[in-house]
Image: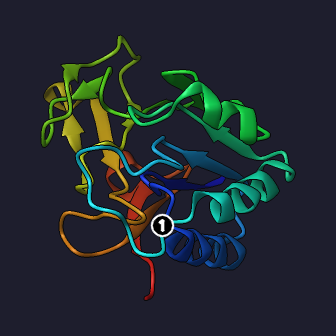
């Protein structure tokens, strides 16, 4: 099972289009969006080509494939749910991969492993699970909770703090330290 993981698009049509190109190239079995999809938020500068009305149909097209799971970020509002054709208001969700591993999906502002200003509120998960979060705009791919849980942050599609616009790939059946990788979006 191959899962494409993205977070923090923040209404950038330019970077959402690059992400759609990555989806086509990667051909994932599932797509996970970890919040902050349309609005840039009051603490962020406007991202390149800020045009949420152009991002909406791109995300709705992904939803039409039936493989999309999304969670709410701190910038989502009820109006976002009114224009998006998929549920995006849950603060967390879980996927169980084909090998039985639990992937806990969240934005990082309510649940998190304490990395880079994400809250330190790790949910109760079975050993060998993974916490997938966004919010910080900083990539993470390392153990959390004394190594029993893996933490993965794909970075930010549109407003990265390290300058590399990115998403993540997860491939089941591999050890956690090999299952996740960061991918850089081309400009």
Q: Is residue 165 visible?
A: yes
In depth, the one of 29 and 66 nearer the eye is 66
Residue at the far top in the pictured view: 124
Q: Is residue 18 toward the left or the right of residue 131 in the image?
A: right
65 lies above or below 106: below
x, y (%) of residue 187? Answer: 43, 88
Residue shown at the point (37%, 33%) measured from the top left: 131
Near-viewer residue (109 or 26): 109
Using the rendered image of the protein, determine whether residue 99 is visible from the camera's viewpoint: no
Q: How is the structure coloured here?
A: rainbow
Front-most of residues 167 and 87: 87
Residue 71 is situated, as x and y percent measured from the top left of the image, at 54, 32
Dot 1, crowdedness within 10 Å: few (<14), some or many (≥20)? many
Left or right of 63? Residue 16 is left
Q: Residue at x 64, y 61 (%)?
A: 55
User: Which residue shows up at 35% across the image and 22% down it?
Assistant: 127
Picture quadrant of residue 114: top left
Q: Is residue 91 left or right of residue 42?
A: right
**Residue 179 image position (x, y, % from top left):** 44, 54
Left or right: 95 in relation to 131: right
At mark 1, the secondary structure is loop
Q: Which residue in the structure is indicated by mark 1? A: 50
The image quarter containing residue 22 is: bottom right
């Amino acid at each position: 099972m191959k899962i494409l993981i993205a977070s923090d698009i923040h209404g950038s049509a330019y970077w959402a289009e690059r992400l759609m190109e990555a989806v086509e190239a990667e051909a994932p079995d599932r797509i996970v969006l970890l919040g902050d999809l349309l609005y840039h938020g009051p603490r962020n500068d406007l991202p390149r080509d800020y045009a949420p009305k152009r991002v909406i149909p791109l995300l709705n097209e992904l939803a039409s494939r039936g493989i999309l799971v999304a969670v709410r970020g701190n910038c989502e509002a009820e109006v976002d749910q009114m224009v998006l054709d998929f549920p995006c208001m849950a603060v967390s969700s879980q996927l169980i991969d084909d090998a039985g591993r639990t992937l806990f999906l969240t934005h990082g502002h309510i649940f998190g492993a304490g990395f880079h200003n994400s809250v330190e509120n790790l949910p109760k998960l079975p050993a060998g699970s993974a916490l997938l979060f966004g919010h910080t705009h900083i990539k993470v791919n390392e153990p959390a909770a004394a190594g029993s849980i893996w933490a993965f942050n794909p970075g930010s599609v549109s407003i990265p703090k390290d300058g590399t616009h990115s998403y993540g790939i997860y491939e089941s059946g591999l050890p956690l330290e090999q299952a996740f990788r960061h991918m850089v979006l081309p400009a």
